[in-house]
Image: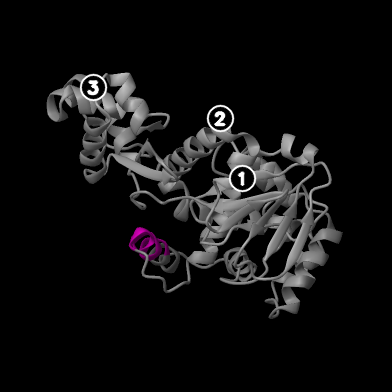
């Protein structure tokens, strides 16, 4: 179990990342790639990425990148720098600038768990060429495994942020932390992560905690090993409708809102609009001046059509758009 200890100052400084972190998504997707999970939301993605990797000539950098990211256990902290909050290129630049002392520490920890390939020797010495090769491999892998699916990843993370925003508004930071259950439990100033691979305690010491919602995070949230680094907790989001690549980076153009109203009816079109930033059943009823039963019925129809996803939190249900729902609404 991982126990994260909060002070009053830490509560004030805890926040949710503004968007999916592209470097964390890259690294965590590598952990899922060789798995044998029958998760239908990832099966097509895994087949496509594996096929793409086989058709490419495996560079030394790609082989090293995969060796640094085993499916289970420790992976180097330097691969997921705090700077990646500002975007993919900022994260890659931080990786390229990793001090030799950190490279040696992280690689030694990884080697203790099962060894390293020969290509890691130049990285262990901190040779600039090795770091460049590694980040070039990260760029190559990102273009194949993450970039084509980014719209879907953003939509899933956006839906999760709507849930966390609502929890924060209703219950403050403690409500936000409590909303991370069931894999995470908040009690008496301590955030407990169950099923963590090792027993560990992390004291935030006034730095606060950055919560990073992640599409490719597996069931158990992830934290950096080094307690001196800016504290983060990466946690899984609902994957909504899974992953399908877009051919031009954009979803296919759906009909406009007037046409949408003609297709599904004005009330259901209005339910979609109300759910754009997250909306409970009761709020939908009040905004549209309909009964709670009618609001629930319309939301159920839209959910069954794949346009909404609904999350129950105690006695309320929060509705948010799926990627398909957002694409239809944003035409």
Looking at the image, residue 43 lies above or below residue 147: below
**At 57% across and 52% down in the image, what residue appears?**
235
Q: For the residues marked 1 and 3, what is the alpha-carbon distance in whole angstroms?
A: 36 Å
**Residue at the image position 53 percent from the left and 63 percent from the top:** 30
**Marks 3, 2: nearer the viewer:** 2
Closer to the camera in the image, 331 or 131: 331
Q: Report the residue marked by disc 1.
A: 177
Q: Residue 136 location, x and y as percent?
A: 61, 54
Residue 169 is tagged as: 2
- Marks 3 and 2, the one that precedes in the sequence: 2
Residue 225: where, in percent of width, then height? 74, 61
- The Cα–Cα distance between marks 3 and 2, rounded to whole angstroms, is 30 Å
Q: How crowded is mark 1: few (under 14 residues within 10 Å), some or many (20 or more)?
A: many
Give the percent coordinates (x, y) of residue 78: 73, 56
Instruction: Name which of mark 2 and mark 1 comes first in the sequence.
Output: 2
* Placement of 38 over or under 293, stated as above or below: below
Please give the range of residues in magenta.
Answer: 40-49
Q: Position of residue 82 (x, y in %)?
A: 71, 45
In-image side of 204 versus 161 (left or right): right
Residue 33 is one of the magenta-drawn residues: no
Q: Is residue 301 left or right of residue 35?
A: left
Visible in this render: residue 186?
yes
Crowding at label 2, few (<14), some or many (≥20) Cα neighbours within 10 Å?
few
Q: Residue 257 carries which label?
A: 3
Disc number at residue 280? none
Marks 1 and 3 close (CB-CB < 8 Å): no
Task: Farthest residue to the right: give it.
Answer: 101
Front position in the image: 244 or 241: 241
Residue 247, quarter of the rendered image: top left
Residue occupying the far bottom of the picture: 114
């Amino acid at each position: 179990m991982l126990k994260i200890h909060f002070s009053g100052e830490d509560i004030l400084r805890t926040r949710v990342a503004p968007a999916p972190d592209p470097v964390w998504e890259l690294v965590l997707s590598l952990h899922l790639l060789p798995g044998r999970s029958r998760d239908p939301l990832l099966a097509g993605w895994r087949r496509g990425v594996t096929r793409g990797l086989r058709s490419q000539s495996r560079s030394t950098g790609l082989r090293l990148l995969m060796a640094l990211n085993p499916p289970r256990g420790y992976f180097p902290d330097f691969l997921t720098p705090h700077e990646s909050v500002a975007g993919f290129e900022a994260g890659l630049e931080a990786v390229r600038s990793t001090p030799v002392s950190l490279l040696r520490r992280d690689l030694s920890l990884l080697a203790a768990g099962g060894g390293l390939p020969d290509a890691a020797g130049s990285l262990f010495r901190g040779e600039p060429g090795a770091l460049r090769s590694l980040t070039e491999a990260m760029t190559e892998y990102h273009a194949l495994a993450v970039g084509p699916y980014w719209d879907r990843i953003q939509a899933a993370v956006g839906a999760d942020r709507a849930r966390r925003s609502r929890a924060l508004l209703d219950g403050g930071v403690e409500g936000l932390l409590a909303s991370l259950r069931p894999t995470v439990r908040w009690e008496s100033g301590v955030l407990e992560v169950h099923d963590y691979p090792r027993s560990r305690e992390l004291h935030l010491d006034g730095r606060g905690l950055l919560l990073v919602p992640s599409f490719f995070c597996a069931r158990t949230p992830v934290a950096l090993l080094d307690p001196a680094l800016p504290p983060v907790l990466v946690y899984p989001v609902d994957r909504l409708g899974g992953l399908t690549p877009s051919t031009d980076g954009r979803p296919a153009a759906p009909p406009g809102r007037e046409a949408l109203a003609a297709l599904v009816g004005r009330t259901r079109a209005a339910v979609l609009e109300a759910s754009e930033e997250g909306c409970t059943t009761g709020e939908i009823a009040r905004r549209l001046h309909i009964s709670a039963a009618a609001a629930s019925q319309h939301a159920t129809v839209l959910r069954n059509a794949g346009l909404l996803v609904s999350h129950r939190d105690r006695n309320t249900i929060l509705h948010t758009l799926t990627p398909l729902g957002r694409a239809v609404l944003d035409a």
